[in-house]
Every structure is written in structure tokens, then in C-alpha cells.
Amino acid sequence: MALLYKADPTRGLEWKALLATKAPDLPVHVWPETGDPAAVRYLAVWEPPPEMLTRFPNAEIVFSVGAGVDQFDFSALPAHIPLVRMLEPGISESMVEYITLSVLALHRNLIDYIADKAAERWKLIRLMPAAQRRIGVLGLGRLGEAACRKLASFGFPVSGWSRSPREIEGVTCHAGEAALPGFLAGCDILICLMPLTPETRGFLNATRFAMLPKGASLVNAGRGGHLIQQDLLAALNSGQLSGAVLDVTDPEPLPKGHPLWAHPRVIITPHAASMTRPETAVDFVLETIRRHHQGLPLEGLVDRQRGY
Ligand code: GLV
């Protein structure tokens, strides 16, 4: 019985060392080393290996090493093999930091001040109290909920939107397509933390931007595929949007010379918002394996119909 890790090899070696202490009976292989493929029961992968299940015929659980699962072809995974998203606290803690960083940068006019510095211009912008800056979060899963709670603690009015109804203390929650225009009309800063599915691909587009208050700004820490880049550029250039922080793009990285790189009102980070933390990820994996053997429901189990 063995676990195969296939993602960043440096972190793979950390997984291996941690698991050697926490689960000494579970051999760990770091791709491309696989040991005896028939012994591999658990796969923790980012990009799944080609013909994963023919190669590892005794696989029992497939873990995504990240929070997202849009990199998987669900049709290539037989229904009896659970696909599990990484619900480990390290991912949400670092995502909350990134969202806080981005919201505060936008709220405190950092984009203007960076441009002013380049122009050697000293120009004070009147402060706006947090209570007057309305924040909206698209996607109220683990990451969205954690981000909402932290932002509310600064005194921002926070609302959230999700496909199905949610309740989060201190957060105005909206659900479903019909609620979207009302939600968007009240977002001065819009944050995308949705999973990428066929329904959410291209979600951040001109129609949605037009529903935001004029001068609103955007943080995309979901997937590059959520955003129609031309629509963002048009909205920034018309002043409908005043700024954007993008941690994800499509493709990654953007090609050299892409207009988003040089746009003065866009901050880009290289898919760096959050990273799976080996120390806490291995605990989640071991707990999931334990629950699987006890026939208990698995946290983070992907609903393939829903897409996340
Ligand atoms: C990263 O984007 C992840 O899905 O964890």
C-alpha cells in the first residue's frame, strides 16, 4: 500500500519526510518514481499522470494537491474512485492573507500611489472609511467564507454570492442567478474565489462589470478562465473599473507584450496567492484515508456533476 505524489517535487520530498514520521507504514513515491504501480492506493496529484488509472489499477483515492480540481478530466476517473480537494488550513490562511492584502491595497489607493511615485508626484487622496467600502465575494466555499470573515473584521460591509444559499454571520449572503444584479450593484471591490466550471468560465465579463458601481475594482484569485481579459481592459479604459489585482491569468504566464502586463491599473502576481502547506496537507490526507477505511463521508469529496 503506497501513496504517489505528483506535483512540485521539492514539496513532494517534504511530504515524503513528513509522512515517514506520521505514517511510517505508508511508503511514499515522488513522481516520476512510482515504486510498484500495483501497490499505489492513493494519488496526490496536481496534473494527473496520463492514463492514471490504467497505470495504477488499485488506486482508491485521488487527491488534488490544490484547492481546485479544474485540471482533472472527470470522465477519465471512474465514479467509484473518490476525487478529493485539498481542504487543509494552510491554503485558506494564505488565501485570506492575499485577499486582505489586495483589498487593503485597493481600499488605500495603492495603485494610484505606485503611479504617483513613478511620476515623482506627491498627491494625497482623501481616506474613505472601511464602513463605506462595500466588498463582495463571489464563491462562498472554504476560501470565500474565510475571506469574508476576515474582511468583515476590518469594518467593511461584506456580502457574498454563491450558487446555493449560504449563511455566514456578519455577511449578507446572496444566492443564485436572479440575485446577481443586486449583489453586484453593491460591490465596490469584487473578489472572485469561485471554482472554475463550465458555468463560471468567462463569468467576469462586460455584462457583469456593467452591473458594478462605476469605479469599482476587481480581485481575481479564482482561475484565469473566469475572466474575459478584453472586457476587463475595456472596463478599465472606460473608467467603469478603476483597478484590478490578478493572481491568475489565462494562459499563465501571459505572453510578453500582453496589454495587462503594462496596464497601470492592474497588479499581477504569479498564481502566488496561496499554496498547499505540506505540514497540514499530510494531516488532511491521512485523516481522509482513515475515514475512507472506516466508510465515513469524506470532506472535500468532489461532486463531479457540480464540478467542484
Ligand atoms: C491553486 O490554485 C489551488 O487550486 O490550490
Image: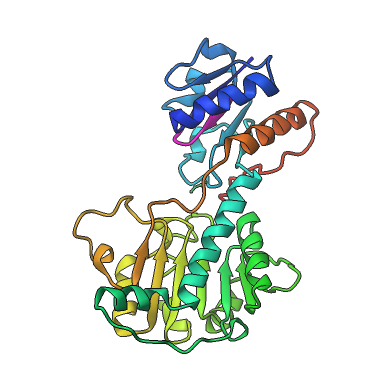
Image coordinates of residue 57 in percent, x first then y, are 55, 18
Residue 93 seen: yes
Residue 129 falls inside the magenta stretch: no
**Residue 247 appears in which quarter of the rendering?**
bottom left
Image coordinates of residue 271 in percent, x first then y, are 42, 51
Q: As drawn, is 218 to the left or to the right of 96? A: left
Residue at (62%, 30%) from the top-left corner? 81
Locate the N terminus and report the quarter of the image it occupies: top right
Which is more toward the observer, 261 or 62? 261
Which is more toward the observer, 292 or 126? 126
In this picture, which residue range is highlighted in magenta? 42-48
Q: Is residue 232 above or below residue 253?
A: below
Q: Most extreme residue toward the bottom, as rendered?
A: 126
Q: Is residue 210 above or below residue 93?
A: below
What is the total number of numbered labels drawn onto the structure image?
A: 0
Image coordinates of residue 65 in percent, x first then y, are 54, 37
Q: As drawn, is 292 to the left or to the right of 72? A: right
Residue at (40%, 56%) from the top-left corner? 248
Residue at (58%, 85%) from the top-left corner? 129
Residue 44 falls inside the magenta stretch: yes
